[in-house]
Image: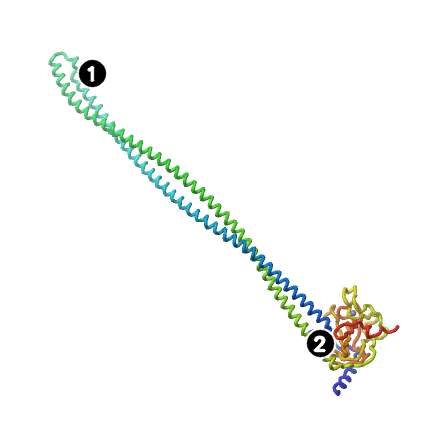
């Protein structure tokens, strides 16, 4: 009781200072975790909003999960295509390898035929050389024979002074028997020797000519063989060209399947990226859910604290003063610019009444009923919320709130009496001009102030 008296004394001093229009700058900043401006209704709404948001996030997570599954099915399809085409590629590659071996075999055959053609050409040139040798031999023998014939003729010419080498003409030229004898004997001898020699030469020539003919036959055969080999080579080259055409066709098949595979890979990777995006989205949603859950827990704790406080107040059942409520301003300030309830300009519910006569700036604000100061908020963000405001608890579940003030003359925990000056009208926070926003709450919910306080008579 003693402390209460002291507090009352101090409060009165402060009130006097306030009503002398002294602004208490730098008054202890009071920064509650959850603003007392949050009513139980607000907190319950916050919890319901958070629950709805969590439910929505969970649906989005489930939806992303379904999308992941659908994309994974698509991705599996492309994986199966990849496996199938790869099997096809492996198969065709086996064919290509076989074809390449066949081409190598064919090339070996061609090389063999070329070698044999080369051999034949060597044999042909060797045979030609021998033919030339034989022809030279024949020519030599022929020359020798001609020489013998010429010499024989000269012998006869010398002996008989005739230009005839004809045996009969030699005989016919004989003048007597001796002559005939001698001539015939000599002629006979000479002839015999010569004929024998010439016969040998002729035999040699004939032999060489036979050899030449034989060589010619051999050469003809070799040429025929060579021609055959050349034909064989052409046939082999045709076969090799066919094999290369077949290999080209197979290469084209491999190329086709590789292109197909590249397309499938691209699709597969596209789905991988989609799935990753969805998983990222899920992770992000999980994070959002966690944050929302934390906000919900905070609101839940605040609500429980509010309820606890309300119960405590109800238990104490502190009633600061009985009787009528008083108007929070000088009765001359009673122009209501916005009433309690739905307001089309704001597009929402108005939690109190706005009083905004001209000349109201700086006017004294009075406690509507006796009570204890719960909030005396001097810090604020310009353009937002209540600005500087006061909340007074009046007991019996009642509270009043005075917002957009330009000055505050009370402190938290201070007891005030009905009609006591607590601050000055201003335009702080979300306000378009000087006015007092006055709220009345009952058991944590905003109620129409006119249900407890009367508009002053003009
Ligand atoms: Zn208002």
Vertical relation: 396 (above or below) 182: below
Left or right of 162 in this view: 296: right
| Tag of residue 427 | none
Q: Quadrant of ligand 1?
A: bottom right
| Number of the label disc, if any, that sits on residue 164 | 1
Give the residue at mark 2.
307
Give the position of the C terminus as an image quadrant: bottom right
* SS assignment at label 2: helix
Q: Quadrant of residue 130?
A: top left
Give percent across and percent down for residue 372.
76, 80
Q: Residue 103 vs residue 270: left or right? A: left
Residue 161 percent coordinates (x, y): 17, 15
Q: Position of residue 377 (x, y in %)?
A: 73, 75
Secondary structure at badge 1 equals loop
Residue 80 versus residue 420: which sits nearer the camera? 80
The quarter of the picture where residue 153 lies is top left
């Amino acid at each position: 009781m003693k402390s209460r008296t002291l507090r009352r004394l101090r409060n009165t001093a402060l009130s006097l200072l306030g009503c002398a229009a002294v602004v208490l700058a730098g008054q202890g900043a009071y920064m509650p975790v959850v603003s007392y401006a949050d009513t139980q209704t607000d907190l319950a709404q916050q919890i319901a909003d958070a629950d709805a948001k969590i439910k929505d996030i969970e649906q989005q997570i489930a939806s992303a999960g379904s999308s992941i599954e659908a994309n994974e099915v698509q991705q599996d399809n492309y994986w199966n295509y990849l496996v199938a085409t790869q099997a096809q590629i492996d198969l065709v590659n086996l064919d290509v390898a076989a074809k390449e071996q066949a081409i190598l075999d064919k090339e070996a055959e061609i090389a063999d035929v070329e070698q044999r053609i080369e051999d034949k050409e060597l044999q042909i040139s060797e045979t030609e050389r021998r033919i030339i040798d034989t022809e030279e031999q024949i020519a030599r023998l022929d020359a020798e024979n001609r020489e013998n014939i010429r010499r024989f003729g000269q012998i006869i010419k010398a002996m008989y002074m005739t230009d005839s080498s004809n045996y009969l003409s030699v005989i016919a030229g004989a003048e007597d028997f001796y002559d005939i004898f001698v001539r015939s004997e000599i002629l006979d001898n000479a002839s015999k020797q010569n004929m024998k020699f010439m016969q040998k030469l002729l035999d040699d020539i004939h032999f060489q000519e036979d050899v030449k003919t034989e060589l010619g036959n051999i050469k003809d055969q070799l040429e025929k063989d060579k021609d055959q080999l050349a034909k064989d080579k052409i046939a082999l080259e045709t076969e090799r060209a066919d094999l290369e055409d077949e290999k080209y066709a197979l290469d084209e098949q491999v190329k086709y399947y590789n292109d197909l595979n590249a397309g499938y890979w691209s699709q597969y990777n596209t789905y991988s990226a989609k799935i990753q995006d969805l998983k990222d989205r899920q992770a992000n949603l999980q994070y959002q859910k966690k944050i929302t859950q934390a906000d919900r827990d905070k609101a839940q704790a605040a609500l429980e604290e509010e309820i606890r406080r309300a119960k405590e107040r109800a238990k104490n059942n502190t009633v600061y003063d009985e009787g009528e409520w008083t108007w929070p301003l000088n009765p001359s300030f009673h122009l209501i610019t916005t009433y309690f309830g739905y307001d089309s300009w704001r597009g929402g519910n108005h939690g109190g009444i706005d009083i905004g006569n001209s000349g109201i700036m700086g006017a004294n604000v009075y406690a509507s009923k006796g009570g204890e100061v719960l909030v005396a908020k001097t810090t604020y963000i310009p353009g937002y919320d209540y600005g500087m405001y006061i909340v007074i608890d009046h007991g019996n579940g009642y509270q009043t709130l005075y917002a957009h003030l330009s000055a505050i003359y009370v402190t938290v925990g201070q007891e005030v009496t009905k009609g006591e000056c607590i601050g000055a009208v201003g335009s702080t926070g979300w306000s378009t001009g000087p006015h007092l926003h006055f709220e009345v709450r009952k058991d944590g919910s905003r109620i129409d102030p006119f249900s407890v306080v009367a508009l002053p008579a003009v």
